[in-house]
Image: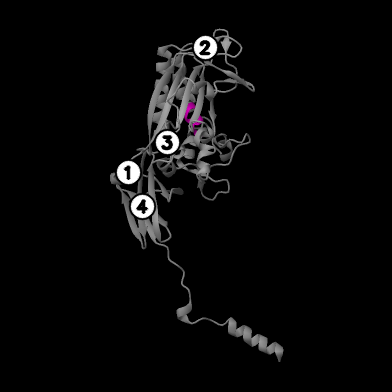
Amino acid sequence: MRVSLHIIAFLILCGCSKAQDVVKPITQPNVSISLESGAAGYIYLDGKFVGKKTPNELYVEKGTHVISIADPSGAMYYRREVAIEKDVTIKMNKADIPAPRTWKALWIGVREAVNPNGGSTHFSTEDLNAAYDFFKWSIAEHFEKYSFGVTHWDVERLDINEPISLIQSGGNQIIPFENVRGKVSSIVPGAYDCVFVFFRQQEGSCAHIGNYFGLAWCDPLIEVEKTGYVIVKFDVGNSIQDKINYYKSTDPGVFLHEWLHTVGESYFTSLGYNLPIPAGDGLRVHAAEIYGYTFPWLGWYKDYMAGKVMSKDGVGYCGIGPEALLNNSVRKTAVGTN
């Protein structure tokens, strides 16, 4: 008898609910997304690439979302904050293009770089003019275009006429940040997002040893000046302009690569963004081959900046993304302003 009572109780507890008590599945609104121009652009939902291009459709949860489109052909970014409660069609136009975030760079040309073992290398004014033009070309063609225009770089130039000393650091001879700080009083927190120092690799019998073209300090917020710091050691060869033209066509990403180290290792991860996993040397920007990218790496830099790197588990994408670049900068974070 006791067993029978338990069976009856179980049946009562597990009985079917009334029709009105059945919970119906929530239907997600369908969002149809396109550009008025008809161009194909990458679609982002709340700052994350969804793996689709326009025109296309998304099912989203009800609520307020940021819908955005990155157009690679025009290097433009469209975004709209939308309260979505039902099916909706979104066709974006130029009115949806936000004003870019201003990032600031200081480019420093070193006229004389002193080797710790004696001797020095030199750049003339004409050499530094050519190098600065190379840097500005990279800013326009890489930094700004790869961000889909959400960044505008305000660039200042300063040539240091006094000798700058290198130090021995492991197997490399480098210009440390502190050797520049004492000569440039304008480098203070909130002034720059990155400082780029350009010096000559070798001249005559003097050569600054080290197996690097560029080096970057990977955590700008721990620096006294709270800014990124990059050094580029340039081998002139027979002609600086010929060498610049060679790099433009063969391996054009030195400035972009090094700047990515300053923001793409710890800065954006500290803000909560999902970046690629580090390579064996512990650096995320060196993980291109892990994700299937090949030299000369421009495709890797583009996707890294666009937040379009397919995650290793094949689910979703990682990288910085235009929304992150639009809403943040090292200067903003350093001093807590907009």
Q: Residue at x 45, y 27 (%)?
A: 187
Q: Are marks 3 and 2 in contact (CB under 8 Å)?
A: no
Estimate the x, y position of residue 116 in percent, counting from the top left: 59, 14
Q: Which one is closest to the eye, mark 3 or mark 4?
A: 4
Check disc 1 and report the residue beneath it.
97
Residue 243, image x and y in percent? 47, 17
Left or right of residue 320: residue 2: right
Going from the N terminus, do you reach mark 1 or mark 2 first? 1
Residue numbers of the magenta segment: 254-260
Q: Residue furthest top?
A: 204
From mark 3 to mark 2, how far is it between C-alphas? Answer: 34 Å
Q: Does dot 2 land on a helix, a strand or a loop?
A: strand
Of marks 1 and 2, the one in the foreground? 2
Disc 4 target residue: 81
- Earlier-in-chain disc, 4 versus 1: 4
Residue highlighted by disc 2:
121
Check disc 3 and report the residue beneath it: 146
